[in-house]
Structures are given as structure tokens and as C-alpha cells.
Amino acid sequence: MILGPVLGLLAAGVYALAYLLLSAAVNAIGHLWGRRPFPNQAANSQWLAWFTAGEGLHNNHHAAPTSARLALGRGEIDPAWWVISALQKIGWAKVRHDKPIFAKSAA
């Protein structure tokens, strides 16, 4: 390990805690506050998307669950899409859908 066993375990613990907290934030905040451009129970929070690599665009995720790109509307920013797009261009990733396939709303 580059950091040594103690710092390596500390780094893993910080990562795990941040991952759990951010996942909880997406599910808590992402279903309460924000814009709802599509008819589902989730909401988009751009400020949360910055912290969670795009997952804060939760309404879009529920509308197009198989899409790698979560920024679907004007002014929405999905930082993870930049990475996915770059990896796709150099041949290290393959995206299943070029355009989002929207889920049918439960009526």
C-alpha cells in the first residue's frame, strides 16, 4: 500500500462513510426537494449532483433508469457523464444507450 496499513484503512473508512452518507442524501433529498420535470416521485437537485457525480438528478434517473447520462434538461450538469464520455472515446467504456430510454409512468 502506498499509504501504509493504518492510513490505508483510514482512507477506506472515510470513503465508505462518504459513500453511505451521499447515497442516503440522494434518497432523502432526491425524493423531497427539487425540480420534477418528469412525472415521478423523485426530484432533481443540481447542487446535490455536484457532490454525488450526477446522482442528484434523481428525477431524471427515475425517468430514464438505464441511461448513463443523467443530465437530460437544459442547464443540468452531470459530472460523471464527462468521465463516462471520455472513457467511451478512448475505448475503455461502452454505453448501452446513446439516447435515454424513458420509463413508462405509472398511471
Image (spheres, rainbow, N blue to C red):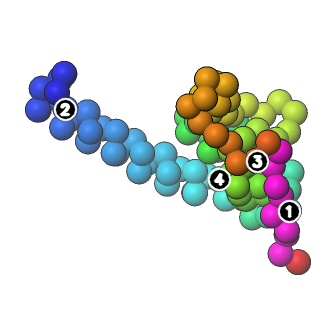
Image-based side of 52 in relation to 71, left or right: left
Q: Mark 3 Cα within 10 Å, few/some/many (few <14, many 20+)?
A: few
What's the CA distance linking mark 3 and mark 4? 24 Å
CB within 8 Å, label 2 to label 4: no
Find disc 4 in the rendering and name its residue: 30
Residue at the (50%, 51%) spot, across then down: 23
Q: Amino acid at mark 2?
A: Gly
Q: Which mark is residue 97?
A: 3
Residue 80 is left or right of residue 96, and the answer is left
Badge 3 or badge 2: first in the primary sequence = 2
Query: Residue 69: in sight, yes or no?
Result: yes
Queried whether the magenta region covers residue 50, the answer comes back as no
Residue 13: x and y in percent read 26, 42
Comes first in the chain, label 2 or label 1: 2
Q: Which residue is mark 2?
A: 8
Does the rendering let one see residue 57? no
Residue type (three-letter) at the residue carrying disc 4: Gly
For the C terminus, give its image quadrant: bottom right
Q: Is residue 1 left or right of residue 74?
A: left
Q: Position of residue 72 (x, y in %)?
A: 82, 41
> What are the residue bounds of the magenta stretch?
99-106
Who's the residue at 42% across and 45% down the image? 19
Which structural element holds mark 3?
Answer: loop
The residue furthest front is: 91
The residue type indicated by label 1 comes to Pro
Position in image of residue 76 (x %, y %)? 78, 34
Front: mark 2 or 1: 2
Q: Identify which residue, 19 or 86, lies in the foreground.
A: 86
Whole-Å distance between the Cαs marked 2 and 1? Answer: 44 Å
| Image depth: mark 3 or mark 4 in front | 3
Most foreground residue, 63 or 48: 63
